[in-house]
Image: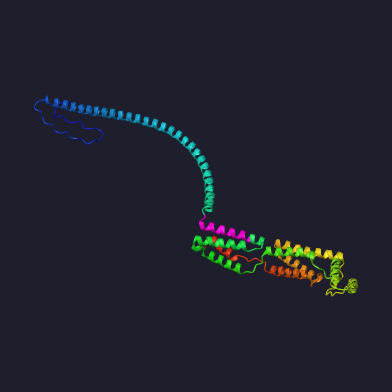
Amino acid sequence: MNSDPNAETPTPTGGDVPLAAPALPTPADDSVIPVKTKSVSRGFVLSLGTVAVAALLASGFLWQKLSSIQEQLARQSADAGAQSVEARSVAKQAQELARETAGRVAVFEARLSEVSLQRTQLDELMKSLSRSRDENLVVDIEAAIRLAQQQAQLTGSVEPLLAALKSADLRVTRAAQPRLTLLQRAIARDIDRIKSAAVSDTPGLLVKLDELLHMADELVLANAVASANGLSLVKKQSAEVLPKWWQRSLQLVRDEAQSLLRVSRIERPEAALLSPEQSFFLRENFKLKLLNARMGLLARQLESSRADLADASQSLNKYFDVTSRKTQTAATLLQQVQAQMKTLQLPRVDETFAALATAAAGK
């Protein structure tokens, strides 16, 4: 260092502009300048040291913080790995649980469908069992009337049908339901119609046919000859009435002459041409026609019964003696049976059945 203050400052090379050095105060004492320079250097060094220490401290702090961050990241990565492994195991368990749940759901759906079907069947059963009292009453009345109608058709009598209708009317009256008023009116009208209808009694017709069958063997044919016992009885009575012997002898001769010759009037020539053997078969044929009419009446075959009775009546009037009292009685019975057969058709109760159907429908 040049201590001369007046010395010239060297000119810098390279074409630089020369700088004028500042004028320093001339110290009075030469020992002051070095002390200040040392103090500045020390301050600079101290500041640099301070900065360095601060930088070191900051670096240490940053390094420590970075280390902690690395440790934290390591721990977090380790935790994340463990969590990922655990998540994989949990996902696997979830998949297995999902499969098991799907199987259970399928089983539950099958059981649910079975339960639904059973519930539907149970509902239908409950509906059929939980019919109201009125519906049960209507069903019972209909069954009773149909059964009575079948009995009436089998027996040929309207008494079972009338009894069933009266019982139904009584039950409807006791029920006292307004919706059954139409049914009660229909039953009353059918009862009145059956009572007013002229229906023949089938048992009475069967009795009359049995009487005709018993009388068939006693009926007198149109060409029948008087029996010998009857002629002898007439001869004996006439001989006892006459007082003298010659009158009795004359009466006996007259009776014998009359027995040799018989004069009678026969309206139909077919009856006169019958032989004794044909007379037997004629009676049997007459009885067979009556039996056929009886069986047709029991079987409710009214048309065939009427045809058989018409044939029997024609045979009776054609081949039997119409002047005989038994023949007249049989003809009268036969006419009565034919007349009653025309009114043998039983009345129907269609109005009651229609009202029952309406009541069962709930209208």
Residue under the point 30% across and 28% down: 64
Is residue 44 in the magenta section?
no
Vertical relation: 71 (above or below) 149: above
Vertical relation: 204 (above or below) 131: below
Q: Nearer the viewer, residue 8 or 96?
A: 96
Where is residue 192? Give x, y as percent: 58, 68
User: Residue farthest to the left?
Assistant: 28
What's the image's color scheme?
Answer: rainbow
Where is residue 18? Give x, y as percent: 20, 35
Image side of residue 229 versus residue 87, left or right: right
| Range drawn in magenta | 131-149
Which corner quadrant of the image does residue 241 belong to?
bottom right
Q: Nearer the viewer, residue 109 or 3?
A: 109
Q: Is residue 294 visible?
A: yes
Image side of residue 159 versus residue 102, left or right: right
User: Residue farthest to the front?
Assistant: 244
Which corner quadrant of the image does residue 16 belong to?
top left
